């Protein structure tokens, strides 16, 4: 199939960029030193490409992602890097299969939920500065003891320095990571275990503490990450069709904010002109010359929530403004929902 | 099932509000004087409630919505109120069934596409002021002639005064609608046909020209519409669970920007406290007291793209902060995608 035969709006991944990003990261963090985060791409087929690159252990953000990865047989070592109360759904997976599932815990309630749901392995989630989940670093040892006393295997610690992912000032970036990871290291000393899990695409090189990096966005890259000096390139595009051209100087594309995430700002036009607005099913563009029926590419700002809006990711040999590129494969985005 | 048994994050509709909104609109615009827009809720099951209230003709924004409505048997009179080039998919539906599908056209290309795709009925889409689709009002008659010359049945005109939907100044609102509808009326005089289609929830009462109102959001209401003095009430909620409580004064809910649209701003907490941020799968809240495991409701700003993120809409007898409301039904959101 050629790109010109795809019904729009549709999500395209540039095959060469995807392959390059995967191999670049695999060279720097081979095998289990990377625990790719499937939340970024929500496709077990893309996850299989990462297995081929040497990474067998994955990180998930939702129960549905875990369920989908188990269904796809990619269940060697799955980490639900999130607090979860609804653990029965996870326990049911373990009962049925020789599946390894570890969950993050940061409270007595989540330890109890893990235990009651049939989970046997946990990481202690530590707050390293971002106002999200994680216990105070001083509490980690105590929680680990509670978890072990209740019969759980505590594999180590987790701490996500998400507040530093997009820091562009090199000095602040490095100092911030050092400070955050000092907290995680101290917590790990109290907790024990072989795992120190954390980091992401934005701290892939600077975070030298973690035994496994939880990066996912690097495969196709966000605009905000692209502003940093990283070796990974943006490879995700929304393919649209011009459905209307106005004498007032604008044209209208057939993909809008239901097809592309807006939380990191509107998408950017590839080629001439600029985006005026995104409505539910339309993007208005101006400052260029378009014809009705012409295909136009948009580059989404934030890949995770953009991919989560689609059923299919079309992998294209090389995405270009010319429509006749070969579609190598069409991957189901099967890990959506909750 | 009780609300407490629903896995979170999940979308809830307040059954009483939904019923009240539907009957209020049906009283004002009975039967075919309302052409409900399914883009707002993307559920053929909800559309069936509107059939029960007397509305058999529907408005769609995407081919997938048309396909889904045909599959559900709700195909008495479907309008694709959008320009479309990929008409073969629509023609295929008409060939198979005694289905009535009308599409909007605003150019020679879209007329040709309608004809070539097997569509036999069109509306001329007229630009009444919003910078989106639609021909110049002066061009409408000429396009209608082209369409008729090519063998298409031109049922009338369509014009959407979307730029006035959220205007809070009453005088500007009324003057703007009058000016926009004068353009549509002039175009209709040139085009002919029995249909003048347009309007929406925000102009439901003031737009007295249209023979059929294209309102959809009124069924569950956006926050922006709720600021206007309308008789419809907000009835959509995201049900979440508190998964983490920090000693730093915040708590974390298990639904984020993948579960709630951000284009009209972040969601609003029902009850104590306020939203700090929405991340992919988390919402941080502060200024209240929460316990891990507690259920918390969020009110989304924009219902259309929020509903499009979910597979299911749970209709609840009466949504409240107490978890034991009865779930009346769980409706598939079957019209998502493109």
Image (spheres, coloured by chain):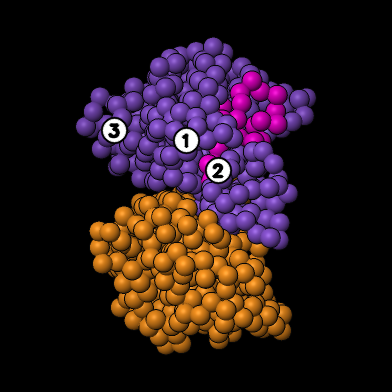
Chain colours: A purple, B orange
Circle 3 packing at 10 Å, graded few (<14), some (14-19), many (20+), is few
Location of mark 2 (residue): A295
Residue at horizontal 40 percent and vertical 46 percent from the top:
A337
| Residue A71 - label | 3
| Subunit under mark 3 | A
Q: Secondary structure at mark 3?
A: helix
Residue at horizontal 36 percent and vertical 78 percent from the top:
B55
Which numbered disc flags the more N-terminal residue, 3 or 1?
A: 1
Location of mark 1 (residue): A3
Check the picture and name the quadrant holding the N terminus of chain A. Answer: top left
Q: Is mark 3 in CB contact (under 8 Å) with mark 1? A: no
Q: Is residue B122 magenta?
A: no
Q: Is mark 2 in CB contact (under 8 Å) with mark 1? A: yes
Query: What residue range appears in magenta?
Result: A217-240
The mark closer to the camera, 2 or 3, is 2
Is residue A93 something one can see in this rendering?
Answer: yes
Residue A332 screen position, x and y as percent: 37, 37
> Gap between marks 3 and 1, in whole Å?
30 Å
> Gap between marks 2 and 1, in whole Å?
10 Å
Q: Quadrant of residue A327?
A: top left
| Subunit under mark 2 | A
Left or right side of B45 for A291: right
Q: Which of A22/B252 is in front?
A: A22
Left or right side of B318 for B98: left
| Residue A244 - label | none
> Gap between marks 2 and 3, in whole Å?
36 Å
């Amino acid at each position: 199939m050629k790109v010109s035969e795809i019904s729009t709006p549709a999500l395209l991944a540039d095959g060469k960029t995807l392959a390059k990003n995967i191999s670049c990261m695999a060279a720097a963090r081979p095998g289990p030193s990377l625990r790719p985060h499937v939340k970024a791409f929500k496709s077990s087929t893309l996850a299989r490409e990462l297995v081929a690159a040497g990474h067998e252990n994955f990180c998930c953000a939702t129960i549905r992602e875990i369920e989908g990865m188990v269904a796809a047989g990619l269940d060697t070592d799955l980490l639900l890097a999130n607090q979860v109360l609804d653990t029965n759904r996870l326990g049911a997976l373990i009962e049925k299969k020789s599946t390894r599932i570890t969950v993050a815990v940061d409270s007595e309630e989540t330890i109890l939920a893990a235990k009651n749901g049939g989970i046997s392995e946990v990481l202690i989630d530590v707050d390293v500065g971002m106002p999200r989940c994680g216990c105070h670093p001083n509490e980690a040892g105590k929680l680990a003891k509670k978890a072990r006393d209740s019969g759980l295997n505590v594999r180590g610690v987790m701490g996500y320095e998400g507040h530093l992912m997009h820091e562009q000032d090199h000095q602040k970036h490095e100092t911030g990571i050092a400070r955050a990871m000092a907290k995680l290291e101290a917590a790990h000393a109290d907790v024990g275990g072989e795992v120190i899990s954390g980091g992401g695409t934005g701290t892939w090189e600077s975070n030298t503490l973690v035994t496994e990096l939880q990066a996912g966005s690097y495969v196709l890259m966000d605009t905000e990450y692209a502003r940093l000096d990283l070796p990974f390139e943006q490879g995700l595009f929304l393919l649209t069709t011009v459905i209307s051209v106005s004498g007032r100087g604008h044209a209208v594309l057939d993909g809008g904010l239901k097809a592309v995430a807006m939380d990191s700002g509107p998408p950017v036009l590839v080629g001439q002109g600029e985006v005026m607005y995104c409505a539910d099913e339309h993007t208005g563009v101006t400052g260029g010359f378009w014809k009705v029926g012409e295909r136009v590419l948009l580059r989404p700002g934030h890949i995770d929530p953009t991919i989560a809006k689609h059923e299919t990711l079309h992998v294209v040999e090389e995405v270009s403004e010319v429509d006749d590129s070969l579609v190598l494969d069409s991957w189901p985005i099967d890990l959506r929902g909750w």
